[in-house]
Image (cartoon, grey):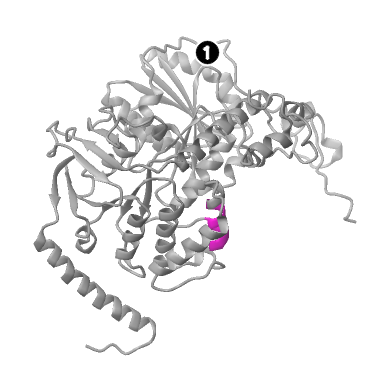
Amino acid sequence: MIMHNKVIAEIIEKYPFVEAYFEENKLDIKGHENKTFADFLNSFSQEEIEDFAIDKESLVLNLEEYINLMKSFLGIQEESGIQSLTILPGHDKSENPEGFNELTIRKSEIISIVGPTGSGKSRLLADIEWTAQNDTPTGRTILIDGEIPDKKWRFSSNNRLVAQLSQNMNFVMDLTVREFLELHAASRLVEDVEGTIEKIIEAANNLAGEKFALETPVTSLSGGQSRALMIADTAILSSSPIVLIDEIENAGIDRRKALSLLVDEDKIVLIATHDPTLALIADRRIIINNGGIHSILETSEEEKELLVKLEEIDHFVQGMREDLRYGKQLTK
Amino acid sequence: MNLVVFSGPPSSGKTSIILKTIDALKQRDISVGVVKFDCLYTDDDELYEKAGVPVKKGLSGALCPDHFFASNIEEVVQWGRSMGLDMLITESAGLCNRCSPYIKEIKGVCVIDNLSGINTPKKIGPMLKSADMVVITKGDIVSQAEREVFASRVNSVNPKAITMHINGLTGQGAYELSTLLYDKEKDIETVQGMELRFPMPSAMCSYCLGETRIGEAYQMGNVRKMDLGDDYA
């Protein structure tokens, strides 16, 4: 027992994050700081125990567990993060072996994923998230840094391997951008909250077509602004080393900058997309069919040339969009 | 036979998660049946039937569904055994978030959704706090940040639980859950004599017994008054 004979004030001093534990469990410790946690719980009357559904025994055990989890979480944050993700082949829905030998994706690398709806993109992602060890329907094996991954990636709620960004995502909290980021930073136990928030809003505004302020409610951001904020926040604040993006709509956001931001923050980036401007930014793309990886294509020189052309068209359209927004007459 | 108890607020995605999980269990030739507990109405049994899953439903009507669960679980287990199931899943929606139907020694899974708001983990009592596994749904429609904040709040009220994110629409994560639920060695013959993980509230007042009239004179038993302060007049 870490805090068996420690009073609450001492526990808080040693592990400041336990205040969140008291808060979330609705335990008002004010005025009880000089008691041990067990004594504090014993001060509740039988009626209060029933009213607040207090389970003394598990609250004590859980506090212990919580401290251990948070300690290891903080320890992991100090580590340098992961260097590479390796996928070893399994088979498709018809039990045919997948068409590659070994796929290693390094940090700061972008890889795209293409394939019709229902072809197995979700399954691939689930395999990565679960760090499959030939124990999922595809028979794939996932390695982290070339080794069999630690179980923590499967079971810990604070250390997820994959962060996801998709088209359908919305902000549902009724908060300003600042409050929203403060909340996220607090849950990640960030020390320099103010500095981190500044960094995120600057990065987000660098991506967004139209700038926004920290005092804007997140629910009134435009589609492009929301995506910009989500990407900047995921790049800078999320602990997940792998980011999966499910399309980024081409409006109100500079997608190339968005991807470089993620890459600069040492993320491994997977993009499921059928938009050529996005898919060709990656050096390689995974072709999925019938539940399996059919092949892995390198982006060819010709495709890279095409990408330049596509980006010019993109730029042209974006320019017109801007002109429209600011009330200009469009010219050839 | 394995027994698994699913619980969670209404509309959190329990049925979708169970159906996707059963799909995964079926691939491994594990036969699963479901008993759905609800209060006034449910048509989820049709969804299970459509999926070819043996199902029974129990409507508690005037009773609290969790109390109804406790009074019926033994019979339900015997039904599952007579059907020759490898796994029986019970599904029930908590109504007041105060009770939980989990039984000691039996796996308990709580399903909650990201859309319910970040203060939800604080509001739900033993249903969340004493679960062995917490499944978080609807992650595909909220931002990464909200998912992370929500998960960390779940973690602070139930640090022991395995927390999983499952997409009830695509089933992403359901296969993984299925591997954690089924235990070949486990065989529940009866739940007779087992204990609930947490006592249900001992409320019993005249309204529990059918009283409809309002007023001091009709309030009997466990009656409690709100503290409205004395600054009103």
- Nearer-the-camera pick, A76 or B106: A76
Image quadrant where residue A54 sits: top right
Percent x, y of residue A317: 26, 76
| Residue B204 located left or right of residue A62 | right
Total labels drawn:
1
Percent x, y of residue A17: 61, 41
The residue wearing badge 1 is B191
Q: Which residue is drawn at 68% across and 39% down?
A: A13
The amino acid beneath tag 1 is Val
Q: Residue at x 55, y 31 (%)?
A: A68
Q: Is residue B204 magenta-colored?
A: no
- Nearer-the-camera pick, B173 or B194: B173
Image quadrant occupied by the N terminus of chain B: top left
Q: Give the range drawn in magenta.
A: A173-184
Percent x, y of residue A89: 18, 34
Q: Eyeballing the image, is B221 above or below A108?
A: above
Image quadrant where residue B127 sits: top right
Badge 1 element: loop
Percent x, y of residue A278: 24, 61
Q: Eyeballing the image, is A329 above or below B135?
A: below
